Image (cartoon, rainbow, N blue to C red):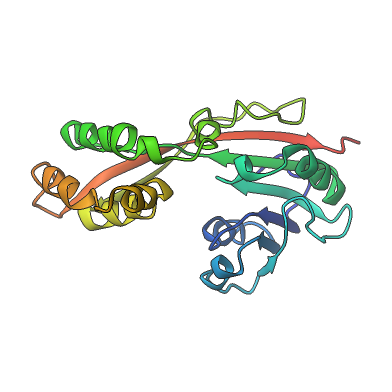
Amino acid sequence: MTHAPGTARVWDCACGSGQASLDLAESFAQVVATDLSAAQLREAQAHPRIEYRVALAEESQLPAASQDLVTVAQALHWFDCERFYAEARRVLRPNGLLAVWSYSICTLESAAADALLQEFYANTAGPYWPPERRHVESGYQSLPFPQPELTVPEFAMQLRWSLDQLLGYLGSWSATSRYIKARGSDPLPALRAQLQAHWPAEDGRLGIMWPLKVRAALLNRS
């Protein structure tokens, strides 16, 4: 976020339960974290520098020229992009930074376990993703974006997860829920049995990595 004109205020748009908001609070004096879902915001962790609000991405109710940074994590594909970009321009200070990012399927450090995960993603859950998923797959390159666009280095999230943590994550996918509703069965127990054979017995954790696709631009250039 070194391109932002300051570290006073950031708007984290479509924050969900606030995971990215907490990270932003480590670098910014004030975080306004908004989401359309009051239920999601009730799950967010309280923090003295974060204010959670229910608001539309296209109508934030924030003061004009009040934010150094506007961020969107894994939600841009649900917005009316042109209206959202207009709102971002309105609330950003001169040379304010807009940064959006997405991540698609993760990879596992075990080749055998990863092959099973990729098969589940593409062929088991695949038919049940909403059409907007294609924008996530493209790293948002299929969506319009303000120009000129900044060159952004590559990023990745890396963790070590137990098998239960991975299956909990897969169970949170909307595609998994749609599969269960459509077919009346849960595909995860069978996947657990397959993955178990390739999961380490020592500490019970495997390395997992999500490549982050980031797009950024400076708006309201002075």
Q: Is residue 42 above or below residue 186?
A: below
Quadrant of the frame with the C terminus: top right
Nearer to us in this view, 12 or 170: 170
Nearer to us in this view, 208 or 112: 112
Nearer to us in this view, 25 or 111: 111
Q: Is residue 55 above or below residue 110?
A: below
Give coordinates of residue 209: x percent, y percent. Answer: 36, 40
Q: Left of 109 or right of it: where is 51? A: right
Q: Left of 3 or right of it: where is 139? A: left
Q: Left of 46 or right of it: where is 158? A: left
Quick one: which residue is furthest to the right in this view?
222
Q: Residue at x 36, y 35 (%)?
A: 126
Give coordinates of residue 4: x percent, y percent. Answer: 74, 44
Q: Residue at x 52, y 35 (%)?
A: 131
Quadrant of the frame with the N terminus: top right
Q: Is residue 127 above or below residue 61?
A: above
Q: Residue at x 83, y 42 (%)?
A: 86
Q: Residue at x 40, y 40 (%)?
A: 128
Q: Left of 186 or right of it: where is 61? A: right
- How many marks are shown on the rendered structure? 0
Q: Is residue 62 above or below residue 104?
A: below
Give coordinates of residue 24: x percent, y percent. Answer: 61, 56
